[in-house]
Amino acid sequence: MGVLEGLFGVDSNGAVQPKLVSDWSRSDGDTRWEFTLRDDVTLHDGSALGADAVVFSLERAFSTSGSRLSGLPIDAVEAADDRTVAVTTSEPLASLPGQLTRPPAGIISPDSANGDGEVESAIATGPFQVDSWQPDSQLAVTKHDGYHGTVPTLERAVLERVQDPQTRMLKLQNDELALATNLPSSEASTLGHESGLTLHRNEGPGTQILVFNTDRQPLSDRRVRQAMLYAIDRNAIVDSVLEGIGSPAHAPWDSERIDWSADDLQTYEHDAEQAATLLSEAGWEQDGDVRRKDGQDLQITLWTYNDRPTLSDVVTVLQSQLGTVGFDIEVRVTEWGALNEAKQNGDFDVFAGFWTFYRSPPDPDTLTNFYHSEQNILDSPYQNAEVDELLESGRTTFDESERAEMYNEVQEIVMTDVPVGFLTRQTKVNGTQSSVTGYDPNPITFDQGLQDISR
């Protein structure tokens, strides 16, 4: 909603850009960063942005338990002077500017917290400031007249949390909402033809993926994992489940959008014959509808969770597609908590989930979150010492060409090992009243671009 800003932001192509800083430098073997703050930034309470607010915010972001920034190798955050902040790391961290674009690194005034250090408000720097907040229900913002960039046209906006997507659609149709996001794919046609409404197909950073338990048979055999990916018809999933709203996904990033994407990666276009060949090479022979090996059926349990409505439909399609090459797939749809417990305990075969590879952080170091044996956030048991070494070297290397070579090599290895498989990219169906202009959300971040909207 345009309230928080970080020292850095990210553009629509995933490039990190300075936001609240005018300059920055590294020293002491690339372990000390100094960030010079812009001198034209005003907080929502009218005070000038100073080093005290940045130190308060970053110390909180790096130390809060559960924050995605808490695991970074940060030794200290301190004010070098009133307008300069120094961050010291225990080892070189090339992705630090990208890490500082993430929501937990948003800058707020120390006055946002009470005497116990608990944040009760958000006195920040963005184009909008908090007017009122009802947790889990509603957030109202008003424009920040002292904003350092273009001051918004909208005087006030209210974000209403409406959990059910069909209810959001009805509220939009009844002019109770000016903008509704994440609408059902089935409503695209309605939005495109209904008078007074405008359809927006906005690319999102989300990707539907499969995460394999590489420690459990039969998926411990790379050929079986590859066969599963060859057996999947992603175009059919987009056409049937997503009703044409979305696109097939074959690798961590789309080369047309993200420069970090390696060229000539092994991908797994639909090829049932290749899937059958790989299964036969792995010793799984066709025996009726289901393949068998050493007296055992090729049976796999495919988990997903019901928080994302399309996932349950996707796994149903996968069950059918994989069955055509001899898999016996049992589908298990649960609450997120049950799946999360199973994956943390390693008690799963494969699960379908919804993750973003673009913004966590907007740097190729995000591959660490998905492929490092000890730092991945998927609870994947995948271990590859070469991948770990490359990821750790990429994190501490600042030469862009050298980094690119390392991350390209990681992509080549993991697209052969396939501990993670890719299904579809998200395209969000959003709708506005026709009177709304300027709506163009950033596809990489959560930012709705409210400051550019007029009505």
Image (cartoon, grey):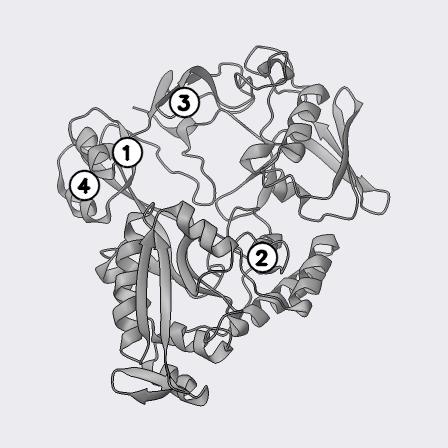
Q: Quadrant of residue 321?
A: bottom left
Inspect this view and state whether residue 178 appears: yes
Disc 3 marks which amino acid?
A: Pro
Which label sits in the foreground, 4 or 2?
Answer: 2
- Sequence-wise first label, 3 or 1: 3
Q: Which mark is residue 191?
A: 4
Residue 121 against residue 352 in the figure, above or below: above
- Give the structural element (helix, strand or loop) at label 2: helix
Is residue 51 left or right of 347 when viewed as pictured? right
Residue highlighted by disc 3: 135
Q: Which residue occupies 56% across, 11% down?
A: 45
Q: Which residue occupies 13% across, 35% down?
A: 195
Disc 2 marks which amino acid?
A: Leu
Do callouts 4 and 2 mark residues in contact (Cβ within 8 Å)? no
Question: Would you call the spot at circle 2 few (<14 residues within 10 Å), some (14-19), or many (20 or more)?
Answer: many
Disc 1 marks which amino acid?
A: Ala
Q: Which residue occupies 51% across, 74% down?
A: 220
